[in-house]
Image (cartoon, rainbow, N blue to C red):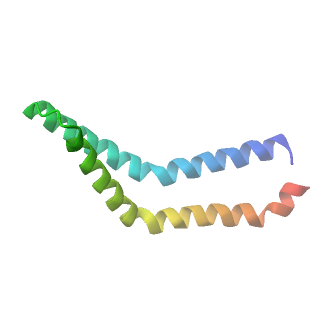
Amino acid sequence: MTPEMVTELGRQALETTLLVSAPILGLSLLVGLVVSAFQAMTQLNEPTLSFVPKVLTLFGAILVFLPWMLGIMTSFMTNLLTNIPDYIR
């Protein structure tokens, strides 16, 4: 395995990780901003007020995006496993 192959494999792994985690992280950020704005406007400083909507959004996002995320991860792993002979040389 050459250093270029290792670098490319690492780049693909990081790209896949960012692509798969982006929808969940983005929705969590959006809900956090909305709840924070609501707390600032109403001056409610209850910690569970920000936690519960984020958790519910996270579960909903996982249910909605899970097939797509599994497809991306499956294609990455299929590509990785089919190229093992190329990595050995």
Q: Considering only vertical position in the picture, is 11 above or below 63? A: above
Q: Considering only vertical position in the picture, is 32 above or below 76? A: above
Q: Residue at x 52, y 66 (%)?
A: 70
Q: Nearer the viewer, residue 54 or 15?
A: 54
Q: Residue at x 36, y 65 (%)?
A: 64
Q: Residue furthest right?
A: 89
Horizontal placement of 65 versus 81: left or right?
left
Q: Residue at x 62, y 65 (%)?
A: 75
Horizontal placement of 64 versus 11: left or right?
left
Q: Nearer the viewer, residue 34 or 89?
A: 34
Q: Considering only vertical position in the picture, is 55 above or below 74? A: above
Q: Residue furthest left?
A: 42
Quarter where residue 4 is shown: top right
Q: Residue at x 86, y 44 (%)?
A: 2
Horizontal placement of 83 versus 29: left or right?
right
Q: Position of residue 74 (x, y in %)?
A: 60, 66
Q: Quadrant of the C terminus?
A: bottom right
